[in-house]
Image (tube, rainbow, N blue to C red):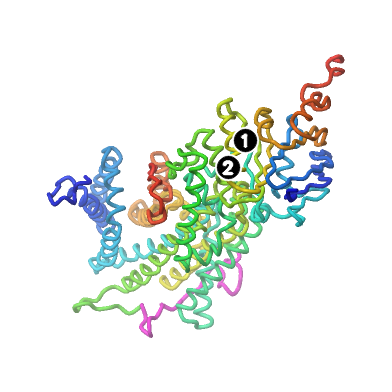
Amino acid sequence: MAEPLLTVANLTMKFGGLTAIDNVSWTLHEDEILGIIGPNGAGKTTVFNVVSGLYTPTGGEIRFRETLINGLPPHKIAKMGIKRTFQQSRLFDTISVLDNVLIGMATISKGIFVNSLFRRDLLSKELALNIKDGLELLHHFSDYLAENLYRRAGDLVPGERRKLEICRALASNPDILLLDEPAAGMDPNESAELMDDILKIRALKKGIGIILIEHDMAVVQKTANFIVVLSYGKEIARGTFAEVSSNPLVQEAYLGSESEYARS
Amino acid sequence: MSHSNTGIPNSNAFINRIITPFLLFVVVAIVYAIVAYESVVVTLLSLVIGASLFVGYSKIPGLKEIIKESIRKDKIILLVTGLVLAIAIPLTLRSQPYIIHILVIAEISIILALGLNFQVGSTGIPNLGYAAFYGVGAYASALLSTRLGISFWISLLAAGFIAALFGWLVGLPTLKTRSYHMALVSIAFGLVTYIMLNNLAFTGGPNGIKNIPAPEIFGWSLFSSIKIFGNAYPVQLNFYYLVLFITLLMVVVSHFVYNSKIGLFWNAVREDEIAAKCSGINASALKLLSFSMGAFLAGIAGALYAHYVGYISPENFNMNTSLQVLGMVIMGGMDNIFGVSIGAFILSVAPEKFRALADFRMLATGLIILLMLMFRPSGIIKQQIRIYATKYFSSKKSSNGDTNG
């Protein structure tokens, strides 16, 4: 049985009177892709913001392996090995592709102050290693990126941006990768490429756990091993894609109930 | 142009090789003419030549690449040439101590602008109260040497560290704020410092501090003029070389920081703080570091100023100074050490050249900034893409790609 990587128990997040996440529990195992789906406003991205440390949950607990991580600042959570991408890809736009990947390695950089000023030899050794790893990673996902290392990230087309964001998150060899709607705004061809990329991540990084928030059901169907469906912050269903998609509650959440139609 | 090693002299390659040093000399000559001659005709003529050179540079398509290539290839030669010129030129100004004085102030401004560049350019922290750090450094050094009789060299370093500590303290409350709010907080800190300097007893109030001793090197005071071949040189020259040395040191430090993980992570914080945090960067610590390091440079600049002029008062460190240094950074080019240095040089020399305009000379400075922002909004030298040396690319797979300049 695969080891549990991330355990979320009774997670609750309230903003004033609004409950964005209501008592949600699930477990992510090694080598697993967990899909989180649900209609807009279901609280999916809030789950990521809580797990990655941007928000402190108002209730429940999040454990990474055995360690309790709720309330830790984002950079510490990243350092433990939980990396994420963003719904609107947030790259560092005015700096180069290569620099974006190097920043992704921030958690594995040592002694940045001392090395920068006094140990230039260590700095250049680390840089050489980082650049080698970064190039290798970029080559796995996109030859275009690997050949245009000095292009400004802001000048890339959306498909390449998405890939670069995934590379940036993977650069430090995380144990868990959170993908927030990677297929948003993509055409079917691009989505197909994305599916390959997600499966590629699993092949490249042994044991990595991936959580995927997605609206594109084709992507979810092909990649996710297990799915949790949220609606208004509450879990309404879980299981494999086949189980979840045949669940009447899920159909109601996405399409509205028949009684509602009758009323209107 | 790649055949230049075949033994046959390639005239094209030769011209390409010498065009950059030639342009360097022309630019230095123009600057020299503008700075050293009081005549308005010379100034205007030089400005016209300089402007046409600049237009030529941006209009002739191949020139940019040639110059870039040559800067990359002959970096060391160009740097040594620049250094030799910087050392030699003031020797020709023996009868014009005032010009040397302007150059010393320009050097101090370069240190100041480099420090502010850490904050505004690299980290993207708007700081409109930077003169506070400058003032803290100047007063710290002046008080240490006048009250406690501490030697210049120790008080110089102490000024740097005291200012850095002050910068760290100022940084703490601004961590929670962003953009406009942060700019407001920095203005408040600038004003508070100015008012404190004006009203505290131990800072001498509005009268400031007088009789700050000159630095001594092994017992030899910098206020005694040196004689070369029987010609006595003005005392300003001593300071020129001292400050030049420290300025170069600060340029090297800035260069190290820029080309390191610190500079890179600062950029990440500037571009997108949330993404930076989620990439594992401790944004708060890096912002505080940026505040402290910028303040350290300001402190050093303040100490140099205090010991050079020998008299400081709160008026030297008011809002005006903050804005002037900010102008230098924006005009020179954010996050570009060379550009910022040029910006600092121009904006500290220009007001002196417009002295004939008397009360309107700040207007001239404003006009320069306005024109710059209209025609070259990203500064004299744009923010560059970091290029990593080929030694870092062990595999042959990588290519240079293209760079935007």
Q: Secondary structure at mark 2?
A: helix
Residue farthest along the bottom direction in this orientation: B219
Which residue position is annotated with label 2?
A: A166
Instruction: Give the label on residue A182, or none.
Output: 1
Quadrant of the image for the N terminus of chain B? top left
Could you tell me which residue is drawn at 60 percent across and 43 percent down? A203
Callout 2, which amino acid? Ile
- In the displayed structure image, the side of residue B151 where residue B358 appears, left or right: left
Residue B360 appears in the rendering: no
Q: Give residue A245's position: percent from left, percent from top.
A: 77, 27
Task: Locate residue A189: give its quadrant.
Answer: top right
Q: Secondary structure at mark 1?
A: loop
Q: Give residue A17's position: percent from left, percent from top.
A: 84, 39
Query: Viewer-proximal residue, A185 or A137?
Result: A137
With respect to residue A77, does B89 lie above or below?
below
Residue farthest along the front direction in this orientation: A1
Query: Viewer-proximal residue, B388 or B149?
Result: B388
Mark-to-mark CA distance, 1 and 2: 9 Å
Q: Give residue B221's position: percent from left, percent from top.
A: 37, 81
Instruction: Give the label on residue B85, or none.
Output: none
Could you tell me which residue is drawn at 44 percent across and 70 percent down? B304
Q: Give residue B116's position: percent from left, percent from top.
A: 49, 57
Residue B32 appears in the rendering: yes
Extent of the magenta region = B196-222
Callout 1, which amino acid? Pro
Q: Is residue B211 magenta?
A: yes
Question: The disc numbered 2 marks a residue on which chain?
Answer: A
